[in-house]
Image (cartoon, grey):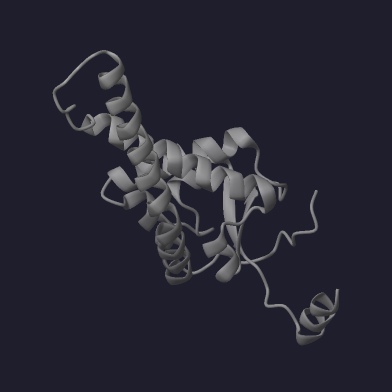
Amino acid sequence: MTDIDENLPSPFILRRLMAILYDTFLVLPLIMMSVAVALGLQRAFVSLAGGTAEPAALHPLLVQGLAIFTTTVFFSIFWLKNGQTLGMQAWRIKLVSFNGDSPSAAACVVRCLGATVSALCLGLGYLWCIVDGRGRYWHDYLSRTELLLLPKKSAKAVSVESET
């Protein structure tokens, strides 16, 4: 068990949306970079094969797959490290498993893929937190993880951290 208080509340939806917006600004350049690398590799393979014509654009399914892969890696790295992305840190949100422990790698991947499904269902999986008694998304239930709102740090705790 971790030192996370199991009685911490679930963050309000506006706080969650702001964290998502923050993280979107971080992950979009990474997605663009992964697509650019794939396009560069495609062009290199075409010229190695002796092709003289300009290679076609990447297949849309490949681009979507790269976006999902890049996003999954981005979020999983942060969640495995300390349960928070940079956006979640800014908005005092932490991801934990249902028993309060850090999420496993499998739970992070399931959560990302479940979040994709939640979004594809016209966002209903995300809006579910409004009607759910515990404030959970569909992908929370799929991955057995949940978001908690961390308490504000006291002024004394902040000053002690700045001294170290």
The furthest residue to the top: 49
Which x, y percent locates residue 116? Answer: 37, 42
Q: Quadrant of residue 44?
A: top left
Residue 57, compared with residue 128, is above or below; it is above
Which x, y percent locates residue 95? Answer: 61, 53
Residue 105, compared with residue 162, is above or below; it is above
Lateral position of residue 163 relative to residue 136, left or right: right
Which x, y percent locates residue 153? Answer: 72, 78
The furthest residue to the left: 53
Does residue 142 appear in the picture of this structure? no
Which x, y percent locates residue 65? Answer: 34, 33
Q: Write the residue at 68% across / 73% down.
A: 151
Q: Write the residue at 48% across / 41% down.
A: 72
Instruction: Say which of 162 and 88 sits in front.
Output: 162
Q: Write the residue at 67% across / 65% down.
A: 8
Labels in figure, total: 0
Instruction: Say which of 97 and 88 sits in front.
Output: 88
Lateral position of residue 151 relative to residue 34, left or right: right
Residue 108, compared with residue 6, is above or below; it is above
Q: Write the residue at 71% across / 51% down.
A: 100
Does residue 27 appear in the picture of this structure? yes
Lateral position of residue 144 relative to residue 153, left or right: left
Instruction: Say which of 143 and 92 sits in front.
Output: 92
Quadrant in the picture for the C terminus: bottom right
